[in-house]
Amino acid sequence: MKKLKLILLASIVGLCALISACSTSDEDPGAKFHGQSEAKIYQDGKKAMLKGDYEDAAAHFAAINADYPFGKFAQQSRLNAAYCYYKNNNNASALAAANNYIRLYPRGAHIDYAYYLRGMIQVSVNRGPIETFFGVDFTKRDLSSLKAAFIDFDHLVRLHPHSHYAADARARMIYIRNQLAKQELHIAQFYYDRAAYVAAINRANTIITQYQQTPVVEPTLALLVKANRKLNLTKDADENLSILQLNFPNSKYLKKLS
């Protein structure tokens, strides 16, 4: 019995020591870099980043922010840390670092990239590595992070139209808009499948008015025709059918609706 108590005590002591060590590391990200100059920490972090060791690089840049918050490399380190966290799939830390940069340096030399990076992080939050690998349709879940990404890209394009990242941001805005429209169609179809035809029509009309020129307009018009027919709204159904025929004369939905 005494032997068992000693083993348990030793285990508890060891666990406490481990927790203490982890806590110290988390509370002071610069602990293992104490005594090193800001320049050395930064250069070593940059080397690690170039080698693709993003976890180690992020630790270096976080140490600069902790020990040299007003130093020569502080501003760039915050941005580098956000990038390294992002590349290491640590989206929560990446977002926090990007937010800190934007809050502290609203007129910083790389503020355009900060908004671009924050947008990329938000996209990554919605479309993680598992969804990407397995091709999961993520438009069937909450897309609030994708909407936030759209705002960041839009901010970049409007305020920094000549930025090196503006063209890519515009392309990503088109992609995001298409995904948001696709989600609206999922919702409209959900209502239609449950015979909630009025709700389906309302959701489909949102797509027609707010997401014109997206790929889902064609199936949305077809859904509107069907939903209006279910409610015996012949005039509205025929009107949507005419719009479908005019804009998509070769649509695969036309045969099913004839």
Image (cartoon, grey):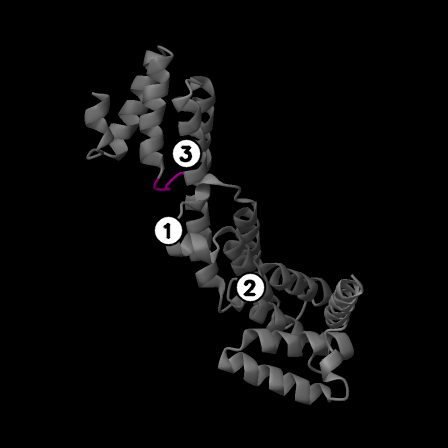
Which residue is drawn at the image coordinates 48% and 59% (left, top)? 169
Earlier sequence position, callout 2 versus callout 1? 2
Residue topped by disc 3: 185
Residue at 19 percent of width and 26 percent of height: 255
Residue drawn 62% across and 74% down?
Answer: 58
Q: Is mark 3 on a helix, strand or loop?
A: helix
Residue sitting farthest toward the top: 232
Residue 215: where, in percent of width, then height? Answer: 34, 41
Whether residue 211 appears in this view of the structure is no
Residue 123: which numbered mark, if any?
Answer: none
Q: How far apart are marks 2 and 3 (CA)?
A: 29 Å
Camera-side residue: 71 or 18?
Answer: 18
Q: Please name the amino acid that badge 1 sits on.
A: Gly
Q: Amino acid under label 2?
A: Leu
Residue 1 on the magenta segment: no
User: In the image, what residue type sits under mark 3?
Assistant: Leu
The mark found on residue 117 in the picture is: 2
Would residue 143 appear left or right of 44 to someone viewing this image? Answer: left
Nearest the viewer among 244 and 252 is 252
Residue stretch in magenta: 211-215
Instruction: Residue under label 1, please give it.
Output: 135
Counting residues from the N terminus, which is met first, the one under dot 2 or under dot 3? 2
Quick check: is 214 in the magenta stretch?
yes
